[in-house]
Amino acid sequence: SGKEARATIATTETDCTISLNKPSAQGYGTIEEHSFSFDGVFGPDASQPEVYEAVMRPQVQALLEGRDTLTFAYGITNAGKTYTVQGGAAPEQRGVLPRALCSIFGALDALRAGGEAAAGSRLDPSCSYKVAASFLEIYGAEAHDLLAPAEKAGSWWQGIRGRGPVPLRIKEGGGKVSVDGLKEAVWADLAEALAAVEYGWANRQSASNGVNDVSSRSHAVLSIKLLVTPAGESKPKVTRLTVVDLAGAEKQKLTQSSGERLNEANAINKDLMVLGHCLRDLRWNQSHPKGTQRVPPYRNSRITMLFRDFLSGSGQTVVIAALNPRAIDAQSTLETLRFASVAQQIKTKPAPAPAKEAPAKEAPKRPAASQSASERTSDGGGDAPDSYVLYEQVLALQERLQQLEAERLGDERRIREEVSAEMQQHMEEMHESLTHSNQEQLASTEESYHKKMLLHKGRHEQSAVDGHVEMQKQHRDSARKDMETLSRISSTNAQLEAARAEVQRLTAKLAEAGSAGGAAAARPEPDTLRREAAEAVEARQLAEGAQAQAEGALQVAKADAAAARATATAAEARATAAEGRA
């Protein structure tokens, strides 16, 4: 139907009850009621001073008395965690962190002035006090120093192109967790401390996620150290007050995030899931002291590695659970309350304060497991099974599923590596075999080519000899033909001369016959003369034709001789070229 669960939240000073009206096919009708008890519950009209006095004032007092403290804000995105911790610009809007700094430096100033506040805070006038601090963020899997100068750490928040923030290394050693390269600044007064915190807060990663225009994309961790050096000693004693603003859990269905924002949300949700897992394991171990103890997965997240000492009982811990009353966030609000309920049930053992006079006012005690939050579930007022047990079972099954998925991925990666190694070895063997085969084939080809070259060279040499013999033969034939042609020309010339002489004779005889005036009996007949003249002319034509034929034969003979000489010359050239190539 597309409907979402509607929620109603009712609060008292220590109790919080959320009623979920879940949709059904007929509409809204299934009501689930969940009640929780905490040390304190603040409604939407609570002021920042009220929250500070109830939540943070005891933490500051513990710091001044020599005990380590941890305060962290937890909740979904856009629930008001950062506002609760840092607050706004106006003095009345200041969050618990700037107010804590005011209390710390106020106590130190009162000590130096010798006022009553110093006695109330159990500060020793014979000791010297210093305040130092470090400020870092956990962004994804990296830790960045928020107090590092911009020119060293990079100014990605200002859009400057260049080097990004320098990642810091979180390491374990000697049972402690430390951050290599994290800057620790000494603050002389309140103004310097507030300016440094504002600077670090401005350097923190933030962006719009579709729900909050200035959503924190990293976990911010501010650790304030109080260094106390007793008179006559050189090594100070150190106590810590740590304030953490966790990034809010996100649901992609609501934020519609993608790309870089989605990657950031996945990293944030993973860190918060690991934190919840650690708290559930700690509660299990405390409620089952004789059972098999679980090992909290601190190393699965950078933020839980930093919290390990506090979560293991080395300090006083307070959780600020921020709720968003929007109906669309009803289920997420219920999950936040369950997280805070689990944290409430964990008993810590704060380190004892230095043995001096009794404190003026005892610090508030953390409730024992028997005094922890209770959860009741009802459907229209009747009793129903405890849904939180089912919720824990679902979480355990999800964690087991993730472990199995990680094992499957590991096996798949191992199998791929083995197959890849086998394929690599097979390819190397094939490469070696092909190389050997190619070398043998190359040697065989070179030998065959050498033999063919020798055979080709022999053939060219024989061709050159045959060409030379043929050229000599053609020379002889040409000479013989030339002699025969010259003989025919000489014979034809002789016949031509004889024909010319006969023509001249007949011509002279005709002339004599025409000019003679003698008797008719002595003069030849005209027919006879004409016949003889015609024969003479024919003989002359035959002689001229024979001469032309002889001249043509001579020209053909000369052309044949020239062709023969050209053929011989070409043969000699081919033979010479073949010898040059050989």
Image (cartoon, rainbow, N blue to C red):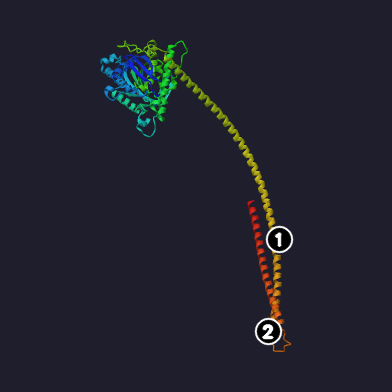
The residue type indicated by label 2 comes to: Ala
The location of residue 550, given as percent across then percent down, is: 68, 70
Quadrant (top left/top right/bottom left/bottom right) for the N terminus: top left
The location of residue 87, given as percent across then percent down, is: 31, 23
Q: Left or right: 96 with respect to 418?
A: left
Which label was assigned to residue 256? none
The residue that disc 1 covers is: 473
* Residue lying furthest right: 521
Does 500 sit above or below residue 383? below
The residue type indicated by label 1 comes to: Lys
In the image, 230 versus 499, the foreground residue is 499
Point 70% across, 56% down: residue: 466
* Count of marks placed on residues: 2
Does 40 sit above or below residue 500? above
Of label 2 and label 1, which has the lower sequence position? 1
Dot 1: element:
helix
The residue that disc 2 covers is: 511
The location of residue 538, given as percent across then percent down, is: 69, 76
Point 34% across, 32% down: residue: 158
Dot 2: element:
helix
In the image, 328 versus 336, the foreground residue is 328
The location of residue 418, given as percent across then percent down, is: 56, 27
Pair 2/1: label in front: 2
Q: Which quadrant of the view contains residue 265?
A: top left
Point 35% across, 27% down: residue: 212
In the image, 553 versus 95, the foreground residue is 553
Q: Assess whether mark 1 and mark 2 are in contact (beta carbons under 8 angstroms).
A: no
Q: Which quadrant of the view contains residue 342?
A: top left
* Residue lying furthest front: 26
